[in-house]
Amino acid sequence: MLDTPPDGTFDRITALAARLFQVPISIVSIVDSDRIWFKSHHGLEADQTDREPGLCASAILQDDPWLVNDARVDTLTNPLVAGEMGFGFYAGVPLTTHDGYNLGTLCIIDHDPRGMTREQIATLSDLAALVMNELELRLTARRTVRLEAELRRNAEEIAATLQESLLPARLPDVAGLDLAARYHVADHDRVGGDFYDVIPTERCCTLVIGDAVGKGVKAAALTGTARWTLRTVALGAWTPADALTRLNDVLFQAYDNPDRYVTLALAEIRPDDNGVGVTMAIGGHPHPLVVRSDGTIESLGETGPIIGWRAGAAYHDAAARLAHGDLLVMFTDGMLEAIAGRGETDDSTIRQVLGPLAGSTASHVADALDAALGADIGDDAAFLVVGAT
């Protein structure tokens, strides 16, 4: 509480005490190691005074209210008594915490000597209890705020660590490809459902962009299942459609719950001397876009069912080629909504962003998409950019 700003609650209590007891001065004091600081001071301009000698410093050594009926007779050497102010009467009640520590006092001061009745002392004690209740409430509030901040920091650290485990540590170096990827989480204390992966294979590599429903631990479990299932499938003979079919079976059998599903776009990438061959399959996910070097933009892939919703879902491969200088951009619906507007499924706004970037490097395109997303996004957003070099 030391050196905190004025507080109307304490100012009202000191003003009330001055009126009740008809004294010119009332103070809520906090006793520090070398000073007495006034949280509230009615009728006195000073904000603090030295601890030694000090009336309040003496009062907090008591367990009960402490009265000095005639300060001049008691020959106190406190400057407030012997100096120009000439205080003649002091009554202070210790401000005692619930665990027995005296922090300071609620005191009343008069220029002339006087006494107090038992009823008046009880009233002053009740006012001191109100002061202490307010101090305890503020302490509890501060502890709650600190605890909430600490819990949030811990949650953010756990979420960030878990999120990192669901994304590749770094993108592989692949001859003939220029790769860039970004991920933006909407809530830093919760694991997002969006994910991406770049899986090296014998034929070259596999690109994955997906969105597991929900957030938090359940989304993380679903993402981990999807990601590692696809990495396992990529070890054998497969096509993107085969991989999505297999993933659909795994998720349906594992969860058998229509509320646990994934949308996903999966591409097999094969660079050669003439560019890059691409085979794409999609399960309920936004269509990736091909940005030709001349600025033409094309959708790629044929939409299949959401993955994990029903058994026996069928998916289809779509083939395309990237010439040198062409780009493939794969993204989640969070990115689409951040750029085009919440609830939007039309990719025309993203096309407007990508059009002027034809022929750019993957990292330059990623920077431009980051800028288009803005700082405040309502949903997680992830994207992959692949350039044919």
Image: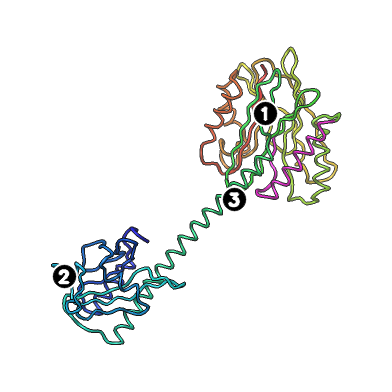
Inspect the image, locate mark 1, and give the three-letter code of the amino acid beneath it: Leu
Q: Secondary structure at mark 3?
A: helix
User: Could you tell which of marks 1 and 2 lies nearer the N-terminus?
Assistant: 2
Work out how far the residue at label 2 is from the one at label 3, CA to CA, in angstroms: 58 Å
Task: Write down the residue under mark 1.
Answer: 171
Across and down, in percent, residue 61 comes to 35, 73
Quick check: is 228 in the magenta stretch? yes
Along the line of sight, the residue nearer the viewer: 94 or 326: 94
Magenta stretch bounds: 209-235
Q: Nearer the viewer, mark 2 or mark 3?
A: 2
Along the line of sight, the residue nearer the viewer: 47 or 173: 47
Across and down, in percent, residue 307 comes to 77, 42
Say if 369 sits above or below 102 in the image: above
Q: Secondary structure at mark 2?
A: helix
Task: Write down the residue under mark 2.
Answer: 82
Residue shown at 69% from the left, 16% from the top: 323
Across and down, in percent, residue 58 comes to 30, 72
Residue shown at 82% from the left, 34% from the top: 233
Numbered label attached to residue 155 = 3
Inspect the image, locate mark 2, and give the three-letter code of the amino acid beneath it: Ala
User: Could you tell which of marks 2 and 3 lies nearer the N-terminus?
Assistant: 2
Across and down, in percent, residue 384 comes to 65, 30
